[in-house]
Image (cartoon, grey):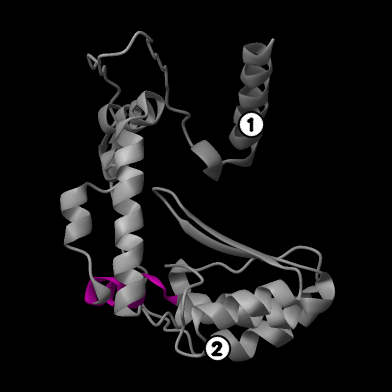
Amino acid sequence: MAFKSTVNRTHLQLVREVEAIGGNVSASASREQMSYTYDALKSYTPEMVEVLIDSVRNPAFLDWEVKEQLQNIKSEIADVSANPQGLLLEALHSVGYSGALAKPLMASESAVNRLDVSSLEEFVAEHYTAPRMVLAASGVDHDALISVVEPLLSDLPCVKRPEEPKYVYVGGDYRCQADSPNTYIALAFEVPGGWNQEKTAMVVTVLQVFLTTVEMI
């Protein structure tokens, strides 16, 4: 539902505004975060920021748009179910962790069927608050960015940050029989501290690039 209709502009208006400045918008979600991004020329920073914040803070969640996207999600679920590699990555989390990180990234179809406008509005109200949001930008002067952003975010609800969900790395083994001539294997391990520690993050990044290079060779 990112960059769909907001209370201030229709989806068509938003698309035309983005296209008018040669911009590009995208959104992504993972187990730990959601991100909305907008790329365009530096001179259009005020327009970019306004559209970005409007999309995050003021989604209209029109009933027909929500239903349309729910159908798209069901199609994506069907595609993932036919993708052994995708299912394998999901399985790594489900057996590797106990707690929050063990939860699947892709919802089940039964869970999707329970979603509606009200549940989306409740999610935004609960999670899109000041302590849980970050605004980052590159290629723009910091003071200039603040002057544009502050009037748009100064009234953002500043509530107490909720306790982080608990999870424990436990390791495990997962095997699944499939009617396929191919075999897919994945090996995963915990990196203590993960991305929270700069030195560890650098080592993991270099290792990831190294392993990818070896695979290509």
Q: Main secondary structure of the magenta part?
A: helix
Q: Which residue is mark 1?
A: 205
Given the image, on which type of amino acid does mark 1 rest?
Thr
Q: Are marks 2 and 1 in contact (CB under 8 Å)?
A: no
Relative height, residue 159 to residue 167 (above, below):
below
The residues colored magenta run: 118-129
Packing grade of label 1 (10 A; few <14, some 14-19, many >=20) is few
Vertical placement of residue 140 versus 75, above or below = below
Is residue 105 at all visible to an observer of this figure?
A: no
Quadrant for residue 161, please give it. Answer: bottom left
Query: Which residue is drawn at the image coordinates 27% and 20% (left, top)?
Result: 172
Of 198 and 181, which appears nearest the observer?
181
Residue 154 circle label: 2
Q: Nearer the viewer, residue 132 or 62?
A: 62
Magenta stretch encompasses residue 91: no
Q: Give the image quarter of residue 48.
A: bottom right
- Residue 166 locus on image (x, y percent): 28, 47
x, y percent for residue 147 = 72, 87
Label 2: element kind = loop
Using the image as rendered, state which of residue 81 and residue 126 is in the foreground. Answer: 81
Q: Is residue 40 left or right of residue 97?
A: right
Task: Estimate the x, y position of residue 210 in percent, counting from the top left.
Answer: 67, 19
